[in-house]
Amino acid sequence: MGDDLCKSLYNLTDSIWLADGGFYLLIKPLRILAIILGAMIARAVISHFIMNVVKRASAGKAPTMLRPLREKIPTSVVNATTVFPERRRQRAEAIGSVLKSMVTVGVFSIAFLIVLSEFGIDLAPLIASLGIAGVALGFGAQTLVKDLIAGLFMLLEDQYGVGDVVDTGEAVGVVESVGLRTITVRDARGVLWYVRNGEIIRIGNKSQGWAQVMVDVPIGFVGVEEATGVLRQAVATFAADPEFAGDFIDPPQVLGVESISVDGAVLRTICKTSADKQWIVQRELRRRLTEALEASGIAAQMQAARTLRAAVPPEEGTVVAAESAS
């Protein structure tokens, strides 16, 4: 089209200078403007598509590829594994922001190369140089690239989010912020840990789905059947309490003797609850079991046995045991 226009100008004016000038002063700028406008339109269209996907993901209608892993796995515990709307919205917006940035860089990089070609610049050496520079940058910043890729997959799979209690190995605490390169975790002592995504080999999320609460109660050498009956009565009362009944997925159970040592037997009690209620349920369960043992007199028997054992030296205790056996 440009050549035809130049020929038309030459035929009309019979001037090579005017024909060449029209090409560089009119046609070239129009081509460059068309390339820039095309890039802006392409970016706007792709960004609009990304925002539609983000809105669907915020409403819980994301494509299967963008759904968290736990939403792809069928489960009967629907209430315990529901992703909260605010968390879903934040995750979708974060993914959308990353995708829009990638689209912007990609589209305008291609447009920039096309504009350079319009000025007659040979792109082959430039692309080769950029390739070598990219390889060198990749080797020099491979940890950064590793962190960014790990962060992107973390967002796509929704492995953890703000407010989750996680165990990264070195740091255990509440996630305060999530980024493509690092996450920040506040531990129980108030220390803020900055953990690079690429350095996380495994992570335990204590805030997703359900949690199993286990409480081990030492009962010394008192009667196991008596102590088990007292604890079962306590957990039955706990499960029937309207204040906590809705927090259980499975009611508490006293499993029986978990271990035996020189200090006596240990009884284990378990219950399944939602992840966000596990600490409240665990503390209340401990309190009720302690009060039940105290009210039944078992705690006093345990204390008396410990006091007697501490007062009698090992040698005398052996003699007493031998005399009682005879």
Image: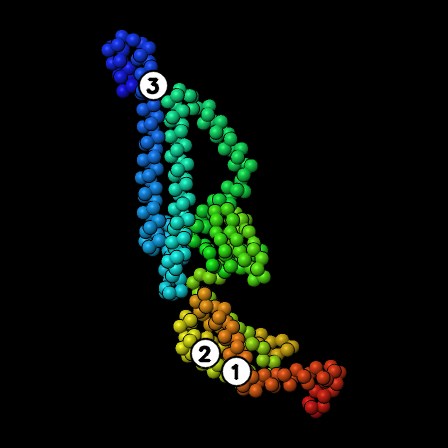
- Precedes in sequence: disc 1 or disc 2: 2
Among the two numbered marks 3 and 1 on one chain, the one whose residue lies closer to the N terminus? 3
Q: Is residue 315 left or right of residue 23?
A: right
Which amino acid does the dot numbered 2 rest on?
Phe
Few, some or many C-alpha atoms within 10 Å of disc 1 (few <14, some 14-19, many ≥20)? many
Q: Which residue is mark 1?
A: 292
Residue ID for mark 3: 25
Residue 238 got which mark? 2
The amino acid sitting under disc 1 is Ala
Neighbours of disc 3 within 10 Å: few (<14), some (14-19), many (20+): few
Q: What is the CA distance from the residue labelled 3 to the residue labelled 1?
A: 93 Å
Amino acid type at image mark 3: Leu
Q: Residue at x 26, y 17 (%)?
A: 5
Kindly identify the residue that appears in the image at 43 percent across and 67 percent down. Answer: 274
- The crowding category of the residue bearing disc 2, from other C-alpha atoms within 10 Å (few below 14, some 14 to 19, many at least 20), is many
Q: Secondary structure at mark 1?
A: helix
**CA gap, disc 1 to disc 2?**
11 Å
The spot of residue 92 in percent (x, y) is 38, 51
